[in-house]
Amino acid sequence: MVDGLIVNGDIVPLTDFLTRLEASKHLIPRDIHDTMQEQGLLLLEFANARDDASASKIMDRYVKLREQFYHQFQEAYQSPSSPTPATPRLYPERGLVE
């Protein structure tokens, strides 16, 4: 199971997530937006999975998307002057490090 996916017995509020994501689509890189949107839609599929085998396949795809998101985020916000990818920079133009 993916940590944080189920909160109080329910899948995280996906409608709210997708609405906020759509409202913010011009504020984040397109590839990151698309990956996040795909993750949200995939979780809707998970909520409607008919059996454990289907749910397991969906979770496998979700984990791959989570890894893809991580790499996209690193690429988009990593400062060119950072010595290693282990130093994530949220706002490279301001020099702020997470």
Image (spheres, grey):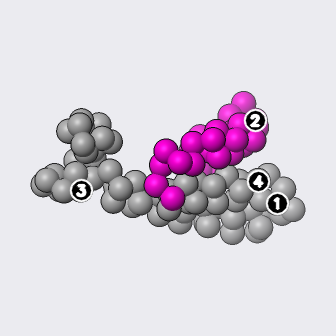
Could you tell me how far apart the alpha carbons at marks 4 and 2 are, in whole angstroms? Answer: 15 Å
Where does residue 43 sit, x and y in percent of width and height?
71, 53
Work out whether mark 1 precedes mark 3 in sequence or the reverse, and give the earlier one. Answer: 1
Q: Where is residue 86 drawn, in percent x and y?
A: 23, 51
Instruction: Kindly identify which residue carries mark 1.
Output: 49
Whether pointer 4 and pointer 2 mark residues with C-beta atoms closer than 8 Å, the reply is: no
Which residue has dot 4 on it? 44
Residue 23 location (% of width, % of height): 63, 41
Pointer 1 or 2: first along the chain: 2
Between tags 1 and 3, which lies in front?
Answer: 3
Q: Residue at x 40, y 54 (%)?
A: 73
**Magenta-colored span:** 1-30
Q: Tell me how far mark 4 sits from mark 3, CA to CA.
A: 32 Å
To which quarter of the image does residue 24 belong? top right
Q: Which amino acid does label 4 sit on?
A: Leu
* Numbered label attached to residue 85: 3
Q: Which of marks 4 and 1 is in front?
A: 4
Disc 2 crowd rating (10 Å Cα; few below 14, some 14-19, many 20+) is few
Q: Is residue 76 visible?
A: yes
Q: Residue furthest right?
A: 50
Residue, disc 2:
9
Q: Position of residue 87 (x, y in %)?
A: 22, 47
Q: Type of residue at label 1?
A: Ala
